[in-house]
Structures are given as structure tokens and as C-alpha cells.
Amino acid sequence: MSEVERAVSTYKEGFNCSQTLLSTYGTQFGIDREIALRLSSTFGGGINGMGETCGAVTGALMVIGLKYGSTKAKDRKAEKKTYKIAREFVDRFTSRNGSIKCKDLLGCDISTPEGREFQKKNKLYKTVCPNYVQSAAEIIEQILE
């Protein structure tokens, strides 16, 4: 099973999209899977169910930080490189999917009762979100090469 397939499988187990990306790829950079799942648990649903930045995007950005992020306060070279790579991810995800905002991707605002009802009725977490997880995983794989 490829890492992309593992990410989608992890999502289908019931983890949120952010947990899926960080737990799948974070272990390559020394982060324990359980810690990755806990750390990213509040980023699902567009950051805590607010419909903002897609959790697949926030999870992927955390992975980019694990690989390229600085560990020294004024390491501007690492910061610049990390931001550049993160921007490349965001641009590629947006190009493929039209947005990085959960509410745009789902076509409803899950932070409202009406939006949550629409999501449930249309099973968007099951029918739409696995595609965004897969998209983010495919892009992160290319970026990590």
C-alpha cells in the first residue's frame, strides 16, 4: 500500500483529514503516530469545525514544517525555504481543487447548523473529503521527494 493509499485509508477509518496527513507522513520525520494524531486533532473540519482552512492542508503544512522548519529563532534562511515550499503546496492544492477553505471545498458552511445538516444529508465527509485527502497526499509526496 502506498503512502497516498494509507492516508486515504486512515481517513476512512474515521480520523479527520488533518490527522490523516500528519500521522501518515509525520513518522518519517520522527513524530510518533499517536502524538501526530493528538496534535492535529483540532484541525479537522477546517480548523475545529469552523469551515476555514481544510484539515488536509493544515496537516500537510505541518509535515512540511517537520521536514523544512527552522529550530533556531532567527534562522531566516530555513524560514524562507519553508514558507516557499508551503506556498507551493497551497498553490498546487488550490490549482487542483479551487480553494483551501473547507466551506468552499464542501459547498457549505459546516460551522452553521444548516451547513452541518447539508453535509450529513449529502455525506460530504464520505464522498468529497477522501478526494481532498488524496490530493493533499499526492502533492505532499511530490514536495517531499
Image (tube, rainbow, N blue to C red):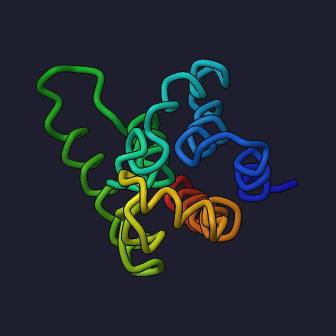
The residue under the point 38% across, 38% down is 65
The image shows residue 26 at horizontal and vertical percentages of: 58, 34
Identify the image quadrant of residue 32: top right
Q: Is 59 situated left or right of 78 in this image?
A: right
Residues 50 and 86: in front is 50
Q: Farthest residue toward the right?
A: 1
Between residue 62 and residue 30, name the one nearer to us: 62
Please provide percent x and percent y for residue 54.
Answer: 43, 56
Q: Classify residue 91 as left or right of residue 17.
A: left
Residue 82 in view here: yes
| Number of numbered labels in the structure image | 0
Which residue is at 75% across, 45% downward? 10
Quarter holding the N terminus?
bottom right
In the rendered image, residue 60, in percent from the top left (x then y), is placed at 48, 49
Image quarter where the C terminus lies is bottom right
Residue at figure coordinates x 36%, y 72% from the top left: 99
Judge by depth and name the residue closer to the eye, 75 or 122. 122
Residue at (21, 40) in percent of width and height: 79
Taking depth in this image into account, of 26 and 15 the one nearest to the observer is 15
Instruction: Tell me: 40 left or right of 33.
Output: left
Query: In the image, is 70 to the left or to the right of 125?
Result: left
Q: Is residue 89 visible?
A: no
